Image (spheres, grey):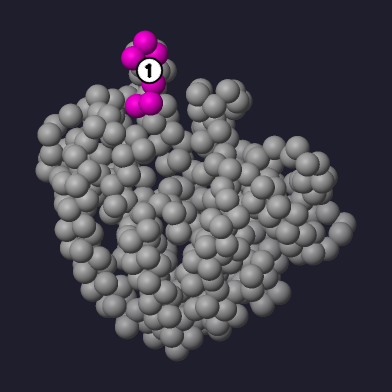
Amino acid sequence: MPPSRDPSALALELLRSARPHVRARSRSPGYYQAADRFSEMFLGRAFQLEPDYFKAVGTDYSAIDCLYEELGPDTGRPGESPEAVTERLQEMTRPGPAYAALVPLEAALEAPTCSLLDVCRALLGAITVLGHESLERRGLSESREDWSRLWQDRVWRQNSQQARLYRLIQVMRAPPEEKAGRLEALGAARDELRVRGTGFARGVHEYLERYGETGAASVALVGGLPFSQALTPRGLSEVLRLLQGEADFLGRMARLMRFAQDVRFDPTEPLNSGVMGYAAEYRQNLADLDATRLPKAELDTRLREEWNSTLADTRQRFDTLVSATREESARSTLQGFVTGFYAIAARLVEAGHEP
């Protein structure tokens, strides 16, 4: 049952209370300042979101990435399995559990030692509640249900991919004496260490198909939609139809944003687009590759070439989709969004993984 206090006010307070917990961990203040600027470009301007919302879904959700990183056996912080964590997070995308968790999560966030899992659950649950409340106030019950399904789907895609990716990375980072044991622990997931495509470009796109959602771009876009002041009710409905449609707008956007961070090959990452492209080219198992030994200059060149081709194809497809949008607020908002999206992608290509 929803708490007796106003759910919207309580959920908004959760977003604000979670923020210091997120930003006191792992990354520098400069990272978050730059990420907030990117989030404003990505969502705040085109969709006219207030800072509490674009900072939450665009920046603070990076805490979920940190959460999965903390689950590895090398961190000295044993806990729940990645799959169990994914289920705990997914629970907060469903309205009933999200409403019920508001008060307990408020209490949890009051402790300086609040677990990162509870911080992430608070962020997800707050957006679930606030999104439902916002759409309900506007009388958009049909859009509310469409948004809820889309929200649950994109969060699941992101976090299930995170869980699978970190399982593989644990194997790839393992010292020789531990690798066999970690391989055995993967079970059927060992098949993900095999690259199915042949040739560099196919390997790159196989990585993006498998793990493109880990960049959280589609979660950010969907999470911000209920709070858009730029979209009329009809415009919001049309945008939701586009995002749910067969054109795969969200998937293409997520993959391109993920790729932008990989164009400059990062040998400190055990697995990324360049590593999988190399594995496909030379028919190697991912468990046998050491990213630090791969030819960085060659991979930089080939990744840039594939990026240029992928960007051109995405632009063409998005231009067609946006121009076909009928409702004026939807069309103008999407035009502004894709313009900002391309600008952010270009900056990420030049900067690599740091904003």
User: Which residue appears at 52% of the width and 78% of the height?
Assistant: 45
Q: Nearer the viewer, residue 58 or 88?
A: 58
**Residue that numbered label 1 is attached to:** 175
Give, as a three-letter code, the residue at label 1.
Pro
Q: Is residue 278 left or right of residue 36?
A: left
Instruction: State the residue in front, 312 or 133.
Output: 312
Q: Quadrant of residue 196?
A: top left
Give whichever of 157, 170 is nearer the camera: 170
Q: Is residue 182 left or right of residue 6?
A: left
Residue 19 point in image, percent of width and height = 68, 55
User: Which corner quadrant of the image does residue 352 belong to?
Assistant: bottom left
Image location of residue 234, percent across then percent down: 52, 82
User: Please, which residue is most extreme toward the top here?
Assistant: 177
Residue 287 on image: x %, y %: 28, 25
Q: Is any part of residue 245 visible from this angle?
A: no
Q: Is residue 170 magenta-colored? A: no
Q: Which residues are magenta?
A: 172-178
User: Residue drawn at (79%, 54%), measured in percent from left and top?
Assistant: 2
Q: Residues within 10 Å of mark 1 (few under 14, many from 20)?
A: few
Up-down relation of residue 353 to residue 68 (above or below): below
| Camera-side residue of 337 and 74 | 74
Judge from the rendering whether residue 117 lies leftward or rightward of residue 284; answer left or right.
right
Q: Residue at horizontal 36%, vertical 38%?
A: 268
Main SS of residues in magenta? helix
Q: Quadrant of the C terminus?
A: bottom left
